[in-house]
Image (cartoon, grey):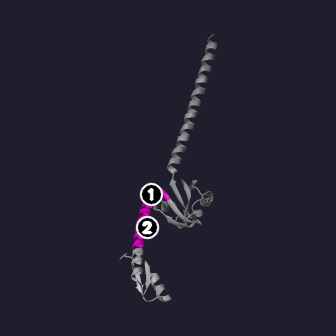
Amino acid sequence: YRLPVVFLTAQADPSTLERAKLAAPFGYIVKPLAHAALQPSIEIAMYKHQMELRLEESEAWLRATFASSADAVIVTDAKGQIRFLNPAAEALVARGATEVSQILPEDPLPLAILQDAPVPIHTQLAEQWVEGYATPLKASGAVIGGVLTLRDVTARRREEQRLRQLEKADTAARLAAGVADDFANLVAVIRKHSDQ
């Protein structure tokens, strides 16, 4: 029922405690008890329950945000083992990949962890070009993993390549027009001299 539970019992033997731990109670009070001991335990249990509900809600927001992101998001532990892929990452990454080193030719996470800052990624995965960042993930000042964000930039790269080719063709056309103009001027000079 998702309610906070505090056990109140006369049993304190190890087997009972182990069974109680499996139920994940918010408290365990052994009889006999004073009234003053019960109230704080109930208040702490209610507070912890509210914090767990907030944490669960926060995780739901985070999961929904990652799931709806158009960029690929890959979360790893400190050793580079993949812990989470959003749907965009699942579409980008080969099936069965369990480590970042299986996805990217050069794993950027160790450098990000060493520099303690995001590291840019520009690489090719199979037929696709991707860009993004590798960022260290910390908790209480200790590195617990990393986050990679990748965006498919294949279409942009192709368009940039096409534009470069158009620029080269335009430059060649201007050069050819300039040569043709110079040649026409030279022919006109030759004609003028021939007429004279």
Q: Main secondary structure of the magenta part?
A: helix
Q: Residue 168's image quarter?
A: top right
Is 39 located above or below residue 73 in the figure?
below
Tell whether position 58 is magenta. Answer: yes
The x and y percentages for residue 125 are 56, 57
Between residues 77 and 143, which one lies in front from this camera angle? 143
Query: From this viewpoint, is residue 186 visible?
Result: yes
Identify the amino acid type marked 1: Ser
The residue beneath circle 2 is: 55
Residues packed near mark 2 inside 10 Å, few (<14), some (14 to 19) or many (20 plus): few
Identify the amino acid type marked 2: Leu
The x and y percentages for residue 51 are 42, 69
Query: From this viewpoint, is residue 126 visible?
Result: no
Q: Residue at x 57, y 28 (%)?
A: 177
Between residues 177 and 37, which one lies in front from this camera angle? 37
The boundaries of the magenta stretch are 46-72
The residue beneath circle 1 is: 69
Side of 5 relative to 165 (left or right): left
- The image quadrant where one finds the C terminus is top right
Q: Secondary structure at mark 1?
A: loop
Foreground label between 1 and 2: 2
The x and y percentages for residue 61 are 41, 62
Residues packed near mark 1 inside 10 Å, few (<14), some (14 to 19) or many (20 plus): few
Q: Residue 124's image quarter?
A: bottom right
Tell whether position 60 is magenta. Answer: yes
Side of 37 relative to 132 (left or right): left
Q: CA distance from mark 1 to mark 2?
A: 21 Å
Q: Secondary structure at mark 2?
A: helix
